[in-house]
């Protein structure tokens, strides 16, 4: 019998508290789910987490820093317009000075959460920017990562996983601050959703839940800065000693499938699962296939 999910907050890094939730039996192998850019942990749907826990896994989802109910960096505002023009001009050292933390710091939060929970080693599953964070965790402390799953993500090399112009425009467009406008704007994300399964109603539902739980637009710029300045992980991935599964949707327009293919090409022995009909999302219709793959990989 599965236990109820448990919400709590843990000190993960100096000055950083991380909100997390667990599903399943703590004596089962741990699976840490790492969410992507500007998305709260609830973007890992509760039913998805429970279905994975029912396969005999102790599932942990959490809010990245500057998102949801985790620590916010209010004292370090980032002027997005200035930041993007600084990056575009190639002045990376000035851009770095504008951003208060790196992708590596976000990876340390995930490792620190495991430490706080008394978990020595875990299976780490990251989606989108969460895949980049998960890769950084495995590179940083391979002994603590039993397996890595990099989902709809990339290697940090600019030539792979590029967004379509349309998807990039949506990603960079600010969302309205009022609740109704924010929820309506979520439908723009259909541009990268699964063509067959993309649902305006589900996008609006998650946006409403996210807005009510923790509307926090200020964190978006800092997370984006950390992601843009993350740099290439290619050299480190070439020697990564962690069993790796790469999952990518063939219809992904936000991170082109070349990002997943490149990741699988670089990591020794990595397995690649390209899902037809999947965009930059995890539609319920494909959960069984995704969970079967995770189950086999983390067995």
Image (tube, rainbow, N blue to C red):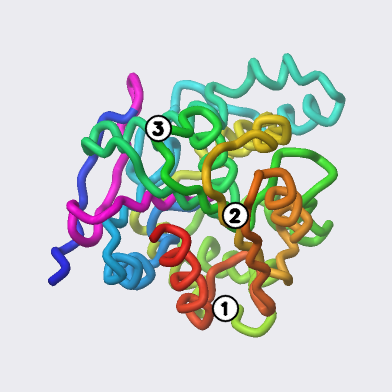
Task: Tell me if residue 289 is in the magenta stretch.
Answer: no
The segment highlighted magenta reads 13-37
Q: Residues within 10 Å of mark 2 (few under 14, many from 20)?
A: some
Q: Quick check: marks 1 and 2 in contact, CB under 8 Å? A: no
Viewer can see residue 214: no
Relative vertical location of residue 237 with respect to residue 249 in this rendering, above or below: above
Q: Name the residue that disc number 1 marks.
A: 200
Q: CA distance from mark 1 to mark 3?
A: 32 Å
Q: Quadrant of the N terminus?
A: bottom left
Quadrant in which residue 66 is drawn? top left
Q: Secondary structure at mark 2?
A: loop
Label 2 sits on residue: 175
Which residue is drawn at the image coordinates 23% and 40% (left, top)?
A: 9
Query: Mark 1 or 3 closer to N-term?
Result: 3
Residue 3, compared with residue 177, is above or below; it is below
Instruction: Look at 75% across and 33% down and name the residue there.
Output: 84
Image side of residue 98 versus residue 68, left or right: right
Q: Give x and y (percent) for residue 62.
A: 36, 48
For residue 109, the mark is 3
Res 159 visible: yes
In percent of the image, x 80 and y 61: which residue is there?
166
């Amino acid at each position: 019998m599965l236990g109820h999910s448990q919400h709590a907050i843990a000190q993960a890094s100096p000055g950083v508290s991380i909100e997390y939730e667990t599903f399943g039996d703590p004596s089962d192998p741990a699976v840490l789910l790492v969410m992507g850019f500007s998305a709260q942990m609830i973007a890992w749907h509760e039913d998805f987490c429970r279905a994975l826990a029912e396969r005999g896994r102790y599932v942990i989802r959490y809010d990245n820093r500057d998102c949801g109910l985790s620590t916010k960096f209010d004292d370090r505002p980032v002027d997005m317009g200035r930041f993007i023009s600084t990056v575009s001009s190639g002045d990376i050292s000035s851009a770095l000075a504008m951003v208060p933390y790196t992708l590596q710091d976000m990876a340390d939060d995930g490792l620190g959460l495991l430490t706080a929970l008394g978990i020595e080693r875990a299976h780490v599953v990251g989606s989108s920017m969460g895949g980049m964070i998960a890769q950084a965790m495995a590179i940083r402390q391979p002994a603590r990562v039993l397996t890595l799953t990099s989902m709809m993500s990339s290697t940090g090399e600019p030539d792979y996983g590029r967004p379509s112009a349309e998807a990039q425009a949506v990603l960079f467009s600010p969302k309205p601050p009022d609740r109704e406008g924010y929820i309506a704007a979520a439908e723009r994300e259909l541009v990268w959703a699964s063509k067959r399964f993309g649902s305006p109603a589900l996008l609006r539902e998650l946006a409403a839940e996210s807005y009510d739980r923790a509307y926090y637009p200020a964190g978006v710029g800092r997370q984006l800065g950390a992601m843009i300045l993350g740099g290439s992980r290619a050299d480190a991935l070439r020697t990564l000693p962690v069993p790796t599964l790469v999952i990518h949707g063939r219809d992904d327009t936000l991170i082109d499938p070349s990002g997943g293919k490149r990741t699988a090409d670089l990591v020794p022995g990595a397995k690649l699962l390209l899902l037809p009909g999947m965009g930059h999302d995890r539609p319920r219709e494909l959960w069984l296939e995704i969970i079967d793959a995770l189950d086999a990989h983390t067995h």
